Image (cartoon, rainbow, N blue to C red):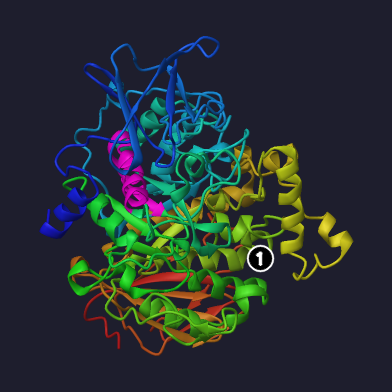
């Protein structure tokens, strides 16, 4: 651990060598210690036990307005709540579990009671990360942690190395994407108990799978978020976000806010053995302090274990600083969502030209630029944002750009929740997936894409009725400027987020995999992921550039190699649109072989083989597709 990391950890109230949580109900040898931050309260009463006749205790107010008491009689499993200035009982805002929902009494949880079996787990190599994003409630079975655990072997055999769980912090109602969390430390009771999440992570580690948790620190949900009730300083009106007043990271009281949020991050790492975090919408973490909150949190998480857990950020700004090393003034994140890849592919294949898609032409030239440097916008003016966007990533390892052809946002934030493969042909989809899984960046798959799932992923909630009505109105207003939804009849087509059928429509249907058109796509994903695992030249790169070029407006050529490949060159040629012949611009006489073709009969019921010239100078595509070739050293490639 560096001095900088040790200092950041200590400054956050965290001991780098040993986890000792501070906030919440913490079991100790002599009872349970309760701490709650309520700086403006005059009286705080802890209510414990039977709700009808609870025992009452009087915590003492200490530094920074944190109230504390040790209750010797308390044990794990006890129910409790707080009364602030004699108000109605409220749940602990940093509760570890809400068995009856975010509005009801909290439960004391002892994280040390779980018997872990992952002593030998050493984490995942960042260069070998293949992320698989899933929503627990709609992924499998009855939508629980246990149901996800039942599919871990499938994911491992598919070739996934890290699953990314959409936010699991508890939310109001029976269903939610997770970005409306109310109880930030408590896994949602809709998915199971805390030990069910621990069992999921433990089972993943037994199969050499990492687990990344999606966490939300840029806003609180509109219902069931009691942190501002206890601590008004948790929010500030000095900054405004799309969700209202910002989380207070730089005004009076912000030191406790930062400490609490960093403890939240570390509690997932220590109490659940998570292998990393994906920070939601970091562009909305508005922070004018000298030490950026995201950098402080990243340093604390990295210091938590000998092999540092990974920290990724969802951020549309294309800021190289976020993933640059700390000794060069950067924030040192392990990766950032690089959306330009998705946006160009979608514009190119589906023709989307509204919203942020106006910034893209949708051609192979743009894709080649992205594959050479990680993202497209490096400071040029964005028409959508009406301002310059991005910085130069020329010294950033390519693996630190996370790319996809669909994720929960790019599917679920569409009016109907339709996926890219619902809008394009099977041949185009195969070509796009091949490019995704052979690119030098870190790839992300969204649940079900590996078999081209027919199910959409729609926006769903279960708020109290009046708030639910406002969400529906807002959803329809949001899409009023979009083609097809700009009339009253069009707006009626947008699914009601509150309706049971919207949630049910988003559940994956695993029986689809048995149908030939889905089995073919699944087989292709498996082969590509196994090729990537077996060949370092096809994995995420520590280099800051890649040999990528556009052969025409629709065709990309990648040339990849690695020190382990002993002089061989791996060539990927992907035609994303139309048919035609392409000139590779070099020749290879003699020793070369085809490793993969999207026209393999395992991947399509009507193969139209790609024609490759014997000297490799030209390739003829009868339709969109891709091939992966391996050329031996000395074969004459130029």
Q: How many marks?
A: 1
Q: Quadrant of residue 72?
A: top left
Q: Which residues are magenta?
A: 255-278
In the displayed image of the protein, which residue is found farthest to the right?
Answer: 489
Viewer can see residue 255: yes
Query: Residue at position x 56%, y 26% from top?
Result: 88
In the displayed structure image, the side of residue 136 where residue 303 appears, left or right: left
Position above or below: 158 against 148: below
Main structural element of the magenta stretch: helix, strand or loop? helix
Residue count near mark 1 (Cα–Cα under 10 Å), binned few <14, some 14–19, many ≥20: some
Q: Position of residue 153 (x, y in %)?
A: 41, 36
Position above or below: 27 against 14: above
In the displayed structure image, the side of residue 360 where residue 92 appears, left or right: left
Query: Residue at position x 43%, y 29% from top?
Result: 44
User: Helix, strand or loop at disc 1?
Assistant: loop
Q: Quadrant of the C terminus?
A: bottom left
- Pointer 1 residue: 425
Is 264 within the magenta?
yes
Is 156 within the magenta?
no
Question: In this view of the protein, which residue sits in the foreground, 182 or 374?
Answer: 182
Query: Residue at position x 52%, y 84% from top?
Result: 387
Query: Residue at position x 45%, y 21% from top?
Result: 80
Viewer can see residue 334: no
Q: Position of residue 490 (x, y in %)?
A: 84, 61
Position above or below: 138 against 35: below
Q: Position of residue 554 (x, y in %)?
A: 56, 81
Question: In this view of the protein, which residue sits in the foreground, 589 or 164?
Answer: 164
In the displayed structure image, the side of residue 201 where residue 218 appears, left or right: right
């Amino acid at each position: 651990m560096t001095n900088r990391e040790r200092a950041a950890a200590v400054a956050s109230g965290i001991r780098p060598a040993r986890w000792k949580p501070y906030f919440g109900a913490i079991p100790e040898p002599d009872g349970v210690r309760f701490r709650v931050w309520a700086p403006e309260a005059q009286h705080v009463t802890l209510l414990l036990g039977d709700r009808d006749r609870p025992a009452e205790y009087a915590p003492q107010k200490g530094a920074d307005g944190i109230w504390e008491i040790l209750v010797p009689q308390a044990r794990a499993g006890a129910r409790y709540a707080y009364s602030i200035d004699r108000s109605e009982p409220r749940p602990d805002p940093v509760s570890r579990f809400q068995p009856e929902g975010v509005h009801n009494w909290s439960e004391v949880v002892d994280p040390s009671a779980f018997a872990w079996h992952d002593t030998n787990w050493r984490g995942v190599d960042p260069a070998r990360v293949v992320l698989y994003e899933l929503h627990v409630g709609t992924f499998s079975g009855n939508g629980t942690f246990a149901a996800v655990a039942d599919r871990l072997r499938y994911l491992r055999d598919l070739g996934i190395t890290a699953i990314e769980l959409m936010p699991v912090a508890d939310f109001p109602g029976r269903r939610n994407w997770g970005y409306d969390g109310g109880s930030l430390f408590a896994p949602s009771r809709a998915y199971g108990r805390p030990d069910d999440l621990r069992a999921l992570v433990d089972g993943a580690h037994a199969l050499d799978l990492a687990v990344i948790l999606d966490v939300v620190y840029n806003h609180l949900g509109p219902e069931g978020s009691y942190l501002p009730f206890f601590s008004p300083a948790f929010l500030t009106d000095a900054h405004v976000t799309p969700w209202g007043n910002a989380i207070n990271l730089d005004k009076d009281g912000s030191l406790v806010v930062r400490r609490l949020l960093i403890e939240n991050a570390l509690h997932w790492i220590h109490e659940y053995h998570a292998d990393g975090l994906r920070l939601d919408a970091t562009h909305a973490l508005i922070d004018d302090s000298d030490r950026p909150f995201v950098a402080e949190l990243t340093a604390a998480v990295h210091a938590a274990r000998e092999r540092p857990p990974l920290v990724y950020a969802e951020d549309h700004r294309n800021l190289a600083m976020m993933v640059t090393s700390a000794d060069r003034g950067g924030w040192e994140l392990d990766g950032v969502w690089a959306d330009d890849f998705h946006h160009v592919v979608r514009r190119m294949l589906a023709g989307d030209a509204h919203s942020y898609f106006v910034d893209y032409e949708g051609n192979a030239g743009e894709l080649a630029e992205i594959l050479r440097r990680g993202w497209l916008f490096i400071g040029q003016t964005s028409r959508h944002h009406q301002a310059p966007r991005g910085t130069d990533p020329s010294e950033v390892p390519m693996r630190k750009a996370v790319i996809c052809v669909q994720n929960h946002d790019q599917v679920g934030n569409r009016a109907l929740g339709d996926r890219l493969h619902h809008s394009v042909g099977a041949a185009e989809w195969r070509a796009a997936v091949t490019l995704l899984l052979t690119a030098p960046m870190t790839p992300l798959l969204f649940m079900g894409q590996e078999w081209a799932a027919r199910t959409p992923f729609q926006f769903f909630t279960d708020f109290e009725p009046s708030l639910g009505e406002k969400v529906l109105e807002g959803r329809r207003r949001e899409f009023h400027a979009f083609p097809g939804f700009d009339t009253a009849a069009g707006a009626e087509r947008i699914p009601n987020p509150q309706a049971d059928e919207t949630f049910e429509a988003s559940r994956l249907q695993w029986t689809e995999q048995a149908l030939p058109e889905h089995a073919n796509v699944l087989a292709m994903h498996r082969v590509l992921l196994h090729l990537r695992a077996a060949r370092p030249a096809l994995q995420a790169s520590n280099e800051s550039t890649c040999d990528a070029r556009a052969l025409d407006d629709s065709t990309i050529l990648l040339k990849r190699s690695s020190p382990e490949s002993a002089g061989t060159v791996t060539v990927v040629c992907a035609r994303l649109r139309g048919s035609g012949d392409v000139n590779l611009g070099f020749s290879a006489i003699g020793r070369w072989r085809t490793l993969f073709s999207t026209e393999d009969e395992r991947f399509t019921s009507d193969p139209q083989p790609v024609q490759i010239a014997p000297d490799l100078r030209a390739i003829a595509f009868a339709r969109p597709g891709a091939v992966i070739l391996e050329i031996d050293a000395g074969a004459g490639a130029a």
